[in-house]
Image: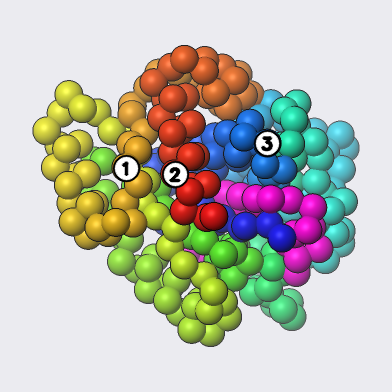
Amino acid sequence: MAKVICVTNQKGGVGKTTTAVNLAYYLSKDKFKTLLIDFDPQGNATSGLGIDKTDTDALGATMTNVVLGEASLASAVRPTKYKNFDLAPATPELANAEVELANMQRKFIRLRDGVREVADTYDYIVIDSPPSLSLLTVNGMIASNYLLLPVQTEFYALEGVAQLLESMKLVMKQANPNLRLLGVLATMYDKRTSLSAQVYDEIKKYFKQLTFKTTIPRNVRVAEAPSHGVPVGAYDKFSKGAKAYKAFTKEVEERTK
């Protein structure tokens, strides 16, 4: 049975999609059969793996079809160029689907139902959720065992986090009592600035042992990799960013044993 991890933060630009893509990549490198579900209407996880999200004919079924009940999650899954690594792609149409979903039955558990169909096929399922507290995000939380929170080490880093955690508690109380916070990952860490160190200390003070020991540095290779349609580990495995995501993945594996 797959361990399902929802990567989320209601703030954009915190490295959420980058974290989801590279976590899935390194899990697959460690021989875990892994599915990455792109559940963000921006579709950045899809394009970040070199797939043209505008070519709807070539894509076939996407998460839009899954959410609307037009296709099974299994039919939307496609292999990536990496062994043990599959993707369920998203396109901008997913935003329209969310509007339709609001008036449909079982609107909060569409993703959970899909995940249950394929859970026995994978060791890990990673969900890249939207940068908002939306209906899609709630679907992601209800479908998951774990919540993973990337937080950038910049001013206002913890803004909105309390609201996200309240939403998590609500989901636990009403729909998914098994959900728990896997941990908080400090991203865009710049050891040359005192601000990064101060914010990281604040994160550790707030989340204590839930803070991952690994920090993800500001790194040119991490920023460049999506434009080449590959994870940073495939783009430059010796870069600081790649080494950090590899170490972080080991921590995730340890915490989900």
Disc 1 and disc 2 in contact, CB within 8 angstroms: yes
Q: Is residue 67 visible?
A: no
Q: Position of residue 237 (x, y in %)?
A: 52, 18
Judge from the rendering whether residue 127 lies leftward or rightward of residue 90; answer left or right. Answer: left
Q: Nearer the viewer, residue 202 or 257?
A: 257
Image quadrant for the C terminus? bottom right
Residue at the spot of label 3: 31
Image quadrant for the N terminus? bottom right
- Does the magenta run of residues contain 227? no
Dot 1 alpha-carbon crowd within 10 angstroms: few under 14, some 14 to 19, many 20 or more: some
Image quarter for residue 221?
top left
Q: Is residue 105 above or below residue 61?
A: below
Q: Nearer the viewer, residue 108 or 33?
A: 33
Q: Position of residue 104 (x, y in %)?
A: 73, 77
Name, please, the residue furthest toward the bottom. 174
- The tag on residue 213 is 1
Q: Name the amino acid type tagged 1.
A: Lys
Q: Earlier in the sequence, mark 3 or mark 2?
A: 3
Dot 2 alpha-carbon crowd within 10 angstroms: few under 14, some 14 to 19, many 20 or more: some
Judge from the rendering whether residue 154 lies leftward or rightward of residue 234; answer left or right. Answer: left
Judge from the rendering whether residue 102 lies leftward or rightward of residue 162; answer left or right. Answer: right
Q: Which residues are magenta?
A: 113-135
Q: Position of residue 86 (x, y in %)?
A: 74, 40
Disc 3 and disc 2 in contact, CB within 8 angstroms: no
